[in-house]
């Protein structure tokens, strides 16, 4: 059986599991709980199919494992595995009919997102198909960049964690949190730096697969591309919620880059933009 077939079978089982679990528990965050796990499995399937003798595939599997371990830890400490549903799904459920939301759950949350989780791992399939290509300096550079991006996402998530811990302490002590949302550190140069690092890592993994093929003209570019599209939609939805909760968020939007870290706009520039 080919490793690609094995990946497809695993993905089908995962889809069935998360869909049934969402119906039983009435909790649609099951895909979130497997998000940091199944891509690791998929990449290792290809590495093992190559007999763990292909350096590029082994490196790809190792760095994706680092990515997954870090993301799993961050998700767990926020209570992601304790039955806490993503607040955005609750908001969306309130805006849709029960039948409409269940269709959304099946086709978007379960099937589409799991489809993307397969696609982002398939640069490993490209590497597997071209495993006679030597592991070279470009591959080393790409692996280092991937790990650097993982470090960047770690910093962004820690800054977010520290902010929310302080915010919870202020509320518990009867103080009004100021500011009401994170605007410092990496969040001064990007409204969603963790989103930037997350997407960039999968583009780098795609380039690792393309390096094996000797060309960036690979259909597996669909993985990082669709992931980017997904994050754009998620960012718009998330920010609509933020604006409804914090009117001052509009000023933050005017002065701060949405995703790609960049210098914040000065007060005069934001005033002129609002005029």
Image (cartoon, grey):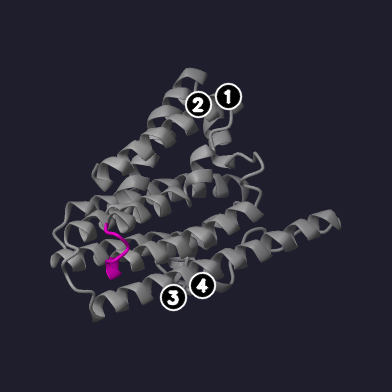
Q: Mark 1 to mark 2: distance in Å?
A: 6 Å
Q: Do labels 2 and 4 touch, CB within 8 Å?
A: no
Where residue 177 sits, quadrant-wise, is bottom right
Q: Spatial distance from mark 2 to mark 4, Cα to Cα?
A: 51 Å
Q: CA distance from mark 3 to mark 4?
A: 12 Å
Q: Mark 1 against mark 3, which lies toward the viewer?
A: 1
Q: In terms of sequence position, does the residue under pointer 3 or pointer 2 come before the other?
A: 2
Q: Residue at x 79, y 60 (%)?
A: 170
Upstream in sequence: badge 4 or badge 1: 1
Instruction: Give x and y (percent) for residue 58.
Output: 34, 66
Name the mark on residue 7: none
Q: Is the Cβ of the residue at disc 3 closer than 8 Å to that at disc 2? A: no
* Numbered mark located on residue 20 in the image: 2
Q: Give the class, few, some or many, for how many residues have Cα within 10 Å of label 1's Cα (few <14, many ≥20).
A: few
Quadrant (top left, top right, bottom left, bottom right) of the C terminus? bottom left
Q: Are marks 1 and 2 in contact (CB under 8 Å)?
A: yes
Alpha carbon separation for disc pair 4 and 1: 51 Å
Query: Circle 4 sits on which residue?
Result: 267
Q: Main secondary structure of the magenta part?
A: loop
């Amino acid at each position: 059986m080919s490793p690609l077939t094995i990946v497809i079978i695993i993905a089908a089982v995962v889809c069935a599991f998360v869909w049934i679990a969402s119906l039983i528990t009435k909790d649609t965050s099951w895909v979130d709980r497997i998000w940091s796990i199944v891509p690791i499995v998929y990449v290792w399937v290809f590495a093992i199919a190559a007999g763990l003798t292909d350096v590029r595939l082994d490196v790809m599997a190792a760095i994706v494992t680092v990515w997954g371990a870090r993301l799993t830890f961050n998700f767990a400490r926020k209570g992601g595995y304790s039955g806490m549903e993503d607040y955005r799904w609750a908001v969306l459920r309130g805006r849709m009919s029960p039948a409409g939301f269940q269709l959304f759950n099946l086709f978007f949350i379960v099937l589409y997102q799991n489809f993307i989780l397969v696609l982002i791992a398939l640069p490993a399939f490209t590497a597997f198909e071209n495993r006679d290509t030597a592991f070279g300096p470009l591959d080393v550079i790409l692996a280092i960049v991937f790990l650097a991006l993982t470090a960047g996402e770690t910093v962004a998530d820690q800054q977010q964690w520290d902010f929310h811990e302080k915010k919870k302490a202020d509320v518990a002590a009867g103080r009004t949190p100021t500011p009401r949302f994170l605007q410092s550190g990496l969040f001064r140069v990007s409204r969603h730096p963790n989103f930037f690092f997350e997407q960039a890592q999968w583009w780098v993994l795609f380039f690792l697969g393309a390096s094996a093929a000797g060309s960036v003209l690979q259909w597996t570019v669909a993985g990082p591309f669709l992931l980017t599209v997904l994050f754009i939609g998620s960012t718009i939805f998330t920010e609509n919620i933020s604006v409804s909760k914090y009117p001052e968020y509009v000023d933050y939007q005017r002065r701060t880059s949405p995703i790609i870290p960049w210098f914040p706009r000065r007060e005069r520039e934001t005033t002129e933009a609002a005029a």
